[in-house]
Image (cartoon, coloured by chain):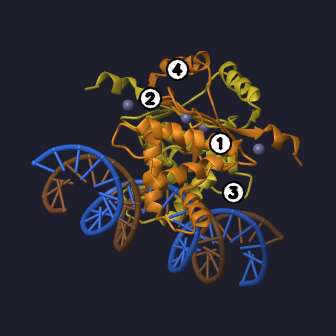
Chain colours: A yellow, B orange, C brown, D blue
Amino acid sequence: MKEQWIERIIEQAKDKYARTGVRLTTKRKRILKILLVSDIPLSAYEIADSYNNAFGESIPEMTVYRILNFFEQEHLSHKLSSTNKYVPCSHHSNSCTCEAPQFLICGKCQTAEEISISKAVMGELEKVALKAGYSLDESQLELKGLCNKCIGSEE
Amino acid sequence: MKEQWIERIIEQAKDKYARTGVRLTTKRKRILKILLVSDIPLSAYEIADSYNNAFGESIPEMTVYRILNFFEQEHLSHKLSSTNKYVPCSHHSNSCTCEAPQFLICGKCQTAEEISISKAVMGELEKVALKAGYSLDESQLELKGLCNKCIGSEE
DNA sequence: AAATGATATGTTATAACATATCATTTGGTT
DNA sequence: AACCAAATGATATGTTATAACATATCATTT
Ligand SMILES: [Zn+2]
Ligand SMILES: [Zn+2]
Ligand SMILES: [Zn+2]
Ligand SMILES: [Zn+2]
């Protein structure tokens, strides 16, 4: 069940910080949850709105940005720079470093899916770059298109 | 010589619109030139500043944005969404449709180079997307890394 | 030459996105 | 309790972008 799945992700994150000074506070948990339950990427301001609606308590935008930055550091979320929106990281728990997050974004319904492009394909891109005199590093890919649902319902 | 090369690009653009109602006005020419002579991508506001400095005449930011939109339509420039900056299209004149522009961006000196990734490699990306249930369309790639110069001068 | 229409630009306001700075609160440690 | 670091609040400001409306410029038609 989705509810449990979300709780598990939060538990894992909590464990991760149990020993350090870092805290997974109520606000952080709530915002992580907002990202997790949303079907689509949200802007910082949409997150703040959602927070207000869900908890009848307003949160400053500044705090949202700070928490998003915290999430970015901790690999709990990502920013989509092509849309200025934020998504939870799908690489739950453990070992993901998310150095080069990769997304498929539907131009119609706005869903975004975090994928893992094979080393082989990424290697090809690196080769192309090298030929042009660049050595790639932390390249986030945001690929646009239409999801199957939206292709089906095309007018 | 760079100066002549720029003039040639502008001439080509002018020709392109000679018959249509669309005009390559002084402001558009100047802004295209600003983009062309800059070593690095510029923000809309930097373009406006540059315009003011170069021509001792101020231009409203709004106008800059409109001209950049015009350039985008006409495939004369592109926006880098990862940095909110603008670059001239390198596919001069003729046949480029630039449906999926591709860039290498140096994280140190900020240079950006427009490249052409082979159909084969792009095809691989499309395959990955299809497997995940997405059909790609107009995906701009912004690959980050270090250019050769900056790798050499690394501390 | 005057009227018209299309394209381009100016002007002002505001939306949307993001960071800087300093004060205060919170929660764990000694 | 006293202390300290982390987190949050509050306010101001910076940055990027569009909306809405008015005016200017230039080519075409009358
Ligand atoms: Zn991730
Ligand atoms: Zn869709
Ligand atoms: Zn191009
Ligand atoms: Zn460089």
Report the residue marked by disc 3: A22
How crowded is the residue under tag 1: few (<14 C-alpha within 10 Å), some, or many (20+)? few
Q: What amino acid is at disc 3?
A: Val
Is A71 rendered above or below residue B132? below
How crowded is the residue under tag 2: few (<14 C-alpha within 10 Å), some, or many (20+)? many
Residue at the image point whose x is 61% and y is 54% from the top: A69
**Are the residues under badges 4 and 2 in a single subunit?**
no
Report the residue marked by disc 1: B4
**Image location (x, y in percent) of residue B33:** 58, 50
Q: State which quarter of the image contains the C terminus of chain A.
A: top left
**Front residue of this view, candidates A88 and B71:** B71
First in sequence: mark 4 vs mark 1 = 1
**Front residue of this view, candidates C28 and A118:** A118
**What whole-number distance in Å separates the C-alpha atoms at marks 4 and 1?**
39 Å
**What whole-number distance in Å separates the C-alpha atoms at marks 2 and 1?**
39 Å
**What whole-number distance in Å separates the C-alpha atoms at marks 3 and 4?**
40 Å
Of circles 2 and 3, the one toward us is: 2
| Element on which disc 2 rests | strand
Of circles 3 and 4, the one toward us is: 4
| Element on which disc 3 rests | loop
Residue at the image point whose x is 69% and y is 43% from the top: B2
Report the residue marked by disc 4: B126
**Front residue of this view, candidates A141 and B25:** B25
